[in-house]
Amino acid sequence: MSEEKSHRIESMRKGIYILPNLFTTGSLFAGFYSMVATMGGDYRTAAIWILVSSVFDGLDGKVARATGTTSKFGVEYDSLADLVAFGVAPGLLMFSWALKPFGRLGWLAAFLFVVCGALRLARFNVQVDTVESKRFIGLPIPAAASMVSSTVIFFYHFGWPGSYKKLAILVLIYFLAFLMVSGVKYYSFKDPELIKRQPFGFLVLAVLLIIIIAAEPAIMMFVFFLCYILSGPITYLVTWPRRRRLEKAVHKGHEAIASGGKK
């Protein structure tokens, strides 16, 4: 038995960290309760509980890092909880709420959302030590689930969606599924500079943002998550010419090295 494997087994025997895993359990509970509400036909409540789950999910990692209680067990448990709360729960919600009239196309869209979320989580787990912490590769599954939830709350605010709006929701689900497994980069909000001293104007803007969200939460949450979803593709398209020039320069450099080696 390898030394690393022995260390993991010994760590499990000693126990697990309670505090961050309690937050993860809270996220899992909220996701499960969302599915219970969906089966009961209370779709607005189901959407709210997915957002509650995202709050717990954001806290568990921060608590673990702040208290120095990160562990392999916590990472795996968090991924399993995320798949339930941000994959299965929103997939079931969207199928029951808007996609059922589309028949096979509808439940396939819901399933695609779930499986792309699972693939996104698996890719994140294997790349967590090799990619920059400031950027996510692909849309994070909590953000995709929050977009789903805010969409449900948004339409409940203005009334039940008509047939053309349901078609837009079908397109949205396929779009979110694609973004989760794409190579599009998203800001992770894990930049250490965010918690350091900032100009006074940042505090004023933050207060104004909180007031605006509190005034119209259904609208502003939808707008906020939509802007975040679109930020990835827009940034990708804007930076495309610069990336192409960089790739060509690197390719020419490789060709120059190869031709020099042949002489």
Image (spheres, grey):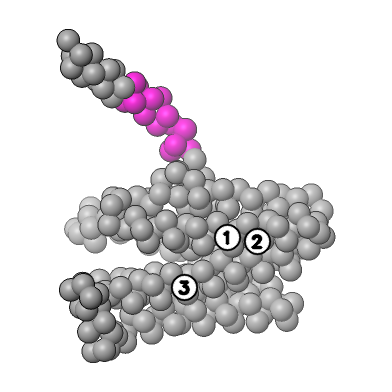
Disc nearer the start of the sequence (2/3): 3
Tell which residue pokes out farthest to the top in this image.
263
Q: CA distance from mark 1 to mark 2?
A: 6 Å
Q: Are marks 1 and 2 in contact (CB under 8 Å)?
A: yes
Q: Which residue is mark 3?
A: 80
Secondary structure of the residue carrying numbered label 3: helix
- Label 3, label 1: how many angstroms apart (C-alpha)? 13 Å
Q: Is residue 125 visible in this depiction of the protein?
A: yes
Q: Residue 184 colored magenta? A: no
Q: Is residue 152 above or below residue 25?
A: above
Find disc 1 in the rendering and name its residue: 115
34 shown above or below 203: below
Q: Residue at x 68, y 64 (%)?
A: 94
Is disc 1 placed on a helix, strand or loop? Answer: helix
Per the model, the C-alpha gap separating discs 2 and 3 is: 17 Å
CB-based contact (under 8 Å), mark 2 and mark 3: no
Local SS, label 2: helix
> Reading the chain from its start, which is encountered first: label 3 or label 1?
3
**Quadrant of res 245:** top left
Q: Please state if 191 lies on the left or on the right of 154 as rendered.
A: left
Residue 66 appears in view: no
